[in-house]
Amino acid sequence: KELCLVARNGQCNRKLGTHLQPLPGDIRAPPMAKSTKWETPTTLWVRIHIDYAGPCQGQMFIIVVDAYSKWLEVILMKNTTPEATIGALRRIFTTHGLPDTLVLDNGPQLTSQTFETFLA
């Protein structure tokens, strides 16, 4: 079976396909990570989810989402150090108060000793 790659102009480039080998038929997708089923909060700011987004046009943003209202807080970040992350969260917590639960990914800003001390 001949492999045919479509170039941007829509023409078939048969030369590119001559260097590719077919994959064995028994390759499986990696196992999916188990998803966490969260209880639905009954009020505002009980559980928030925090993550970084970007780079988007060279900019990084911290995104904070309230699990109850789906309210977004988005802050443009000059840098993404743990100290800068803590500063952004302090501004958000000053406005909305402290949440009961923070849901974080394992990004280096959110797993550092500095950030752990901030949460304690």
Image (cartoon, rainbow, N blue to C red):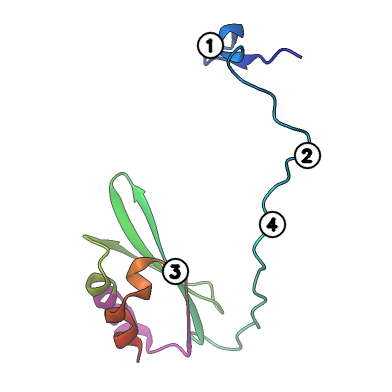
Residue 31: numbered disc: 4
Q: Is residue 34 magenta?
A: no
CB-based contact (under 8 Å), mark 3 and mark 2: no
| Mark toward the start of the polypeptide (3 vs 2) | 2
Residue 85 position, x and y percent, is 29, 72
| Residue at position x 76%, y 14% in the image | 1
Residue ID for mark 1: 9
Alpha carbons under labels 1 and 3: distance apart: 41 Å
Q: Nearer the viewer, mark 4 or mark 3?
A: 4
Alpha carbons under labels 4 and 1: distance apart: 36 Å
Q: In which quarter of the view is residue 32 placed?
A: bottom right
Compare residues 61 and 97 and report the one nearer the observer.
61
- Which residues fall within the magenta stretch? 86-103
Q: In which quarter of the view is residue 119 placed?
A: bottom left
Alpha carbons under labels 3 and 2: distance apart: 32 Å
Element under label 4? loop
| Mark toward the start of the polypeptide (4 vs 1) | 1
Q: Nearer the viewer, mark 1 or mark 3?
A: 3
Residue ID for mark 2: 26
Q: Is residue 93 magenta?
A: yes
Alpha carbons under labels 1 and 2: distance apart: 33 Å
Amino acid at dot 1 = Asn
Q: Nearer the viewer, mark 4 or mark 1?
A: 4
Alpha carbons under labels 4 and 3: distance apart: 19 Å
| Residue at position x 51%, y 83% in the image | 47
Q: Main secondary structure of the magenta part?
A: helix
Residue 75 position, x and y percent, is 31, 65
Residue 106: numbered disc: 3
Element under label 3? loop
Q: How many residues crowd around disc 3 within 10 Å: few (fewer than 14), some, or many (20 or more)?
A: few
Q: How many residues crowd around disc 4 within 10 Å: few (fewer than 14), some, or many (20 or more)?
A: few
Residue 59 position, x and y percent, is 29, 51
